[in-house]
Amino acid sequence: MSRSLGVDYGTKRVGLAISDSLGITARPLSVVPRSAAVDEVLNLVKEHDIGTIVVGLPTGLSGDEGMSASEARKLADELGAATGAEVILADERYTSRMAEDALLESGMKRRKRRENVDKVAAAIILQDYLDRTK
């Protein structure tokens, strides 16, 4: 069974998370610069037999899409074209806040939280997708 990859889009950084081989759990993987995201995801798809990429779609509370959503859709298109994997867009409202809260609760210092919040948000996006599809 192929794995899934979670992607938390950001204008500067992109958080990545990966599922286990059974598609049950997601774990944070890494944070990469936006400029290197497509190449890094392509490497991960090849290395880990990833069949599905779940990209978080940032929307407002009302569900409206702004510039960030447009950029996330652009990244999703780039990932699909580069990897040939199925790309799914998933609502990511509150995921960064949830990730920040979890890291704060764990006692992580502010600087380390900033370094980790994107990959934890990617894991939350991916876990939500895995839970909904099982």
Image (cartoon, rainbow, N blue to C red):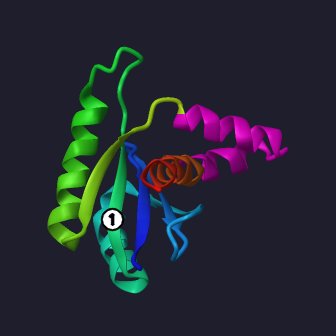
Please state the horizontal and vertical placement of residue 51, each as a whole percent of the image: 32, 72
17 sits left or right of 46 in the view = right
Residue type pointed to by label 1: Thr
Please state the horizontal and vertical placement of residue 4, each as a whole percent of the image: 42, 66
Please name whichever residue, 115 or 42, is drawn nearer the observer in this view of the structure.
42
Highlighted magenta segment, given as a residue range: 95-118
- Residue drawn at x 22%, y 72% is 83
* Residue placed furthest toward the right: 107
Q: Is residue 33 above or below residue 71?
A: below
* Residue placed furthest toward the left: 81
Please state the horizontal and vertical placement of residue 18, each as a whole percent of the image: 50, 66
Q: Is residue 8 above or below residue 3?
A: above
Please state the horizontal and vertical placement of residue 17, each as a whole percent of the image: 51, 61
* Location of mark 1 (residue): 52
Is 117 a magenta residue? yes
Is 20 a magenta residue? no
Tag 1's secondary structure? strand
Quadrant containing the N terminus is bottom left
Q: Main secondary structure of the magenta part?
A: helix
* Residue placed furthest toward the bottom: 47
